[in-house]
């Protein structure tokens, strides 16, 4: 759900009220006519109407452009998370033929998982600032999916000497689920936010 620009609405209402009061004041004090057809109050009302119309269009245009920019940043963050996930998945899968990880490789995998976690946190904070009403549901789904992936990748089998092929298949499956969640998130950003 989009934020209602209350400041903008209040400004418009105040401008309308002020223009009505000024129009009534001018009209009641003097009935000066131009070319026997147009009164000053009518000119003032026309100018006020044009001004309000311009301001409404200007504000809506700016709001639309700002929403477009924010969506761009959110989509960039989701794409970065997706890129890191693909890198992690390929890195893990490259050790399938060895059926084991050494300490260096485990540290590298943990650092890649931490990097994804940090990117998710940055995305969540930005999302919360821009769309606070949508934030909780999106963050919950994304974090649950990430935690499931993290549990599979860095689970007990990750530290065993011989890692089974099932471990690698489970990593690919969980990665696919997380990618699916990222795609849903991308569509949600494009459609509704």
Image (tube, grey):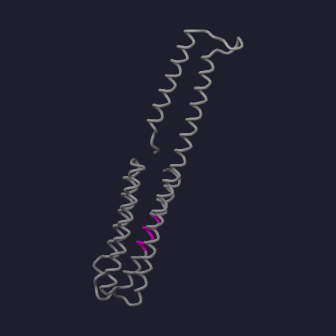
**Among the 4 quarters of the image, the one containing residue 10:** top left
- Residue 178 sits inside the magenta stretch: yes
In the rendered view, would you say 117 is above or below 100?
above
> Is the residue 130 above or below the residue 103 in the image?
above
x and y percent of residue 161 in the render?
Answer: 29, 88
Where does residue 121 sit, x and y in percent of width and height?
Answer: 36, 61
Q: Which residue is depicted at the point 52% across and 44% down?
A: 63
Q: Residue drawn at (28%, 82%), measured in percent from left and top?
A: 159
Q: Vertical placement of 31 versus 102: above or below?
A: above
**Residue 57, image x and y in percent?**
58, 38
Quarter-of-image position of residue 175 = bottom left
Residue 30: within the magenta? no
Residue situated furthest right in the rendering:
35
Tag count in the figure? 0
Q: Nearer the viewer, residue 187 or 108?
A: 108
Q: Is residue 181 left or right of residue 19?
A: left
* In the depicted structure, whether residue 69 falls above or below residue 111: above
Which residue: 50% across, 50% down?
192
Comparing 157 with 2, the one in front is 2
Residue most toward the bottom?
A: 98
Magenta-colored segment: predominant secondary structure: helix
What residue lies at 35% left-to-right and 85% top-to-bottom? 164
The residues colored magenta run: 173-180
Q: Picture coordinates of residue 99 (x, y %)? A: 36, 88
Q: Say left or right for 182 vs 103.
A: right
Q: Nearer the viewer, residue 52 or 137?
A: 52
């Amino acid at each position: 759900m989009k934020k209602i620009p209350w400041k903008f609405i209040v400004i418009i209402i105040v401008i309308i009220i002020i223009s009505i009061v000024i129009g009534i004041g001018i009209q009641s004090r003097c009935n000066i006519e131009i070319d026997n057809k147009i009164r000053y109050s009518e000119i003032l009302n026309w100018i006020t109407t044009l001004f309000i119309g311009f301001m409404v269009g200007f504000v809506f245009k700016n709001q639309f452009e700002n929403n477009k920019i924010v969506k761009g940043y959110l989509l960039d963050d989701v794409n970065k998370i997706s890129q890191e996930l693909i890198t992690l998945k390929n890195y893990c899968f490259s050790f399938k033929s060895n059926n084991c990880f050494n300490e260096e490789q485990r540290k590298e995998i943990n650092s890649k998982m931490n990097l994804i976690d940090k990117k998710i946190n940055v995305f969540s904070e930005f999302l919360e600032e821009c769309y606070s009403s949508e934030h909780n549901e999106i963050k919950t789904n994304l974090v649950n999916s990430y935690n499931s992936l993290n549990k599979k990748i860095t689970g007990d089998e990750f530290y065993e000497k011989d890692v089974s092929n099932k471990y690698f298949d489970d990593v690919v499956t969980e990665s696919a689920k997380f990618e699916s969640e990222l795609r849903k998130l991308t569509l949600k950003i494009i459609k509704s936010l």
